[in-house]
Image: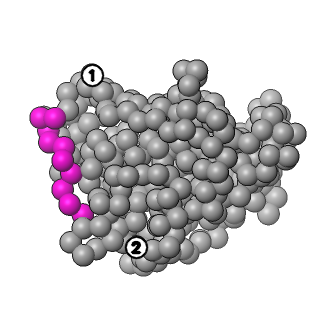
Amino acid sequence: MRPGKSTSETWTVGRELPSLSKALTQEKIDGYARASGDFNPIHVDPAFAAATPFGGTIAHGMLLLAYLSEMLTEAFGRAWVSGGRLKVRFKGVARPGDTLTVRGKIERVQDEGWHLFAAVECVNQAGELLVTGDAEVGLP
Amino acid sequence: MDIALLEKGHRFPPVSFVLDEAAVHRYLEAVEDAALPALCRVEGHDWAPPMAVAALALRGLMEAMGLPAGAVHASQEFEFRRPVAVGERLASRAWVAHRSQRSGWLALAVEMEATDEAGQAVLAGRASVLIPQ
């Protein structure tokens, strides 16, 4: 893989990662079900999901992690895809019609800037926290 | 498999999988990731998106567990050890690392590892799920 564009000088504590937003639709959830093979009816069957405590379909948690991973790929390039670590908790659910925003901020820097720790999260259009966690990456 | 009976230390049968070109294409379309294709195609090699590898490893685990529809994915950890080539055959192994019961829920933490054909780890992870009882 090509070298990532990050350098140890690029990232300092408090610097924000490039955020991104996604408009979530049922079609996108269905597409992720086909790509991942996860056809749990809570994701893809509106009639089934309506009868659950969620009251309707919800996105796969892994789809939200894919969006987080896209942000981390954009920020750290090869360093992320070949040696990153991600640890998250799911705090809420994403529904069709939601606009999701993923964002992050450098929280700690080690090894003279070559090892980075970032807080990451995913929120919906109301600012409700859906995913929160930490990412760790060593720059090449 | 009755998931309510799984004890700490239980090992799920290994699952073999391949992330081929069509699967990568479906994944990239589904997640609308514009940055990955260029990053994953370098010097004549095609590499699989790491979260796609994670998704397929997790799928095998979820199928093995036979999770009921009301199960909730509570937390997730992944560590990507090395890039995976498109078409590379991997095996995922998983075991129950923690089990507890509280307020009508069974909480299971399952650790997993995906390895290449040489037995080297390419991905490690831990998933926590809540299962209504």
Q: Nearer the viewer, residue A112 or A70?
A: A70
Q: Residue at x 12, y 35 (%)?
A: A9
* Magenta stretch secondary structure, dominant: loop
Q: Residue at x 48, y 48 (%)?
A: A66
Residue B75 lies left or right of residue A74; in this view the side is right
Q: Is residue A60 left or right of residue A65?
A: right
Return the residue nearer the eye: B112 or A61: A61
Classify mark 1: residues with Cα within 10 Å, few (<14), some (14-19) or many (20+).
Answer: few
Q: Is residue B42 left or right of residue A47?
A: left
Q: Secondary structure at mark 2?
A: loop
Q: Nearer the viewer, residue A52 or B34?
A: B34
Does residue B17 sit above or below A82 in this rendering?
Answer: below
Q: Magenta span covers which residues?
A: A1-10
| Relative vertical location of residue A38 with respect to residue B69 in this rendering, above or below | below
Mark 1 secondary-structure assignment? loop
Task: Check residue B86 in the rendering and tell me which mark sits there, or answer none.
Answer: 2
The residue singled out by tag 1 in the image is A14
Question: Could you say where residue B130 lies in the image, as x and y percent from the top left?
Answer: 71, 41
